[in-house]
Amino acid sequence: MADLWTGTHTALVTPFTAAGEVDDARLVRLVAFQVDGGVDGLVPCGTTGEGATLSKQEQIRVIARVVEAADRRVTILAGVGGNATDSVVAHARDVEALGVDGVLSVVPYYNKPTQEGLYRHFSTIADAVSVPVILYNVPGRTSCNLLPGTVLRLAAHGNVAGIKEASGSLPQVMEILAARPRGFRVLSGEDNLTLAVIALGGDGVISVVSNEVPMLMSRMVRAALDGEREEARRLHYHLLDLMNLNFVETNPIPVKGALALMGLIEEQYRLPLVPPTPETRERLRRELARLDLIESYVGRP
């Protein structure tokens, strides 16, 4: 773990029981599945982990359990976000005490701060904790874009280590990559753009699809980082349909449906998220069968 923020980092789902509680046993099982699959890091309590519907106490519980189960074998980048800076700072300090390697903090949602407000928000968080801060830009979720100029301004802060870039804009990613300081990591926030981002000089991915295929996604990212272009391209196209299927409905609806089909979790969500449509579930079933992740379903309903 000489470089904490390169490679494949799984945006880990949060399994729930039928009663709607965090499923500790299956969470530990997911961590083992990821570690055995060769990922470089885990990201609990982010978007894919339904962090927005977890209470602060539940987030602490999930992160603590992931830290314990991972047992220093991979890095832990804990999701710590919100739209009130003081509250995020307090929560980040509580999470830091759990032994995480860093915190991932999303652009504040709903209140749509200016670029100066974003700079002050993230600077305040970075000043408040000693573990590194990774920025998370996902304007499709937050309705606010962390622009490259602001990212580069924050990159000069000694405790801002990188960014998860999920704007969907390769020109925006390139602008950051072209001017970033040494050591500032750029991670794709979108599985289907990961190969392109690495080819442009990026450092890896915070991935949804690695929930389902940790070994294959890790191999693709490692091949790309090592300059094995043909192997990376082959694996990219091998996984592309599943990458895209994970977003035909709001993340993490499809990926949790897929993990349930694989027998790894119960298919439980928290409102306002609901299960996938029968059409999406059937498409997932077919793709998982193609990838040999579930038994053949020929003749099944």
Image (cartoon, grey):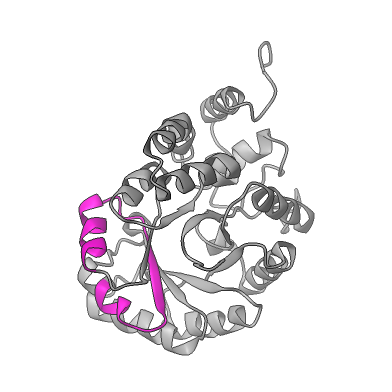
**What residue is shown at x 72% (from left), y 52% (from top)?**
32
Residue found farthest to the right: 25
Residue found farthest to the bottom: 128
Q: Position of residue 284 (x, y in %)?
A: 55, 29
Q: Is residue 279 visible?
A: yes
**What residue is shown at x 53% (from left), y 52% (from top)?**
272
Q: For this view, does 279 lie left or right of residue 289? A: left
Q: For this view, does 98 lie left or right of residue 196? A: right
Tell me if residue 154 is in the magenta stretch. yes
Q: How many marks?
A: 0
Residue 233: image quadrant is top left
Closer to us: 24 or 212:
212
The C terminus: image quadrant: top right
**What residue is shown at x 47% (from left), y 65% (from top)?**
5
Q: Is residue 114 visible?
A: no
Q: Position of residue 196 (x, y in %)?
A: 32, 45
Magenta segment = 152-179
Tell me if residue 106 is in the magenta stretch. no
Closer to us: 270 or 226:
226
Q: Please determine whether, in this image, residue 95 is positioned above or below residue 207.
A: below
Q: Position of residue 17 (x, y in %)?
A: 75, 51
**What residue is shown at x 67% (from left), y 27% (from top)?**
294
Q: Please determine whether, in this image, residue 249 is positioned above or below residue 92.
A: above
Q: Position of residue 118 (x, y in %)?
A: 30, 77
The N terminus: image quadrant: bottom right
Residue found farthest to the top: 299
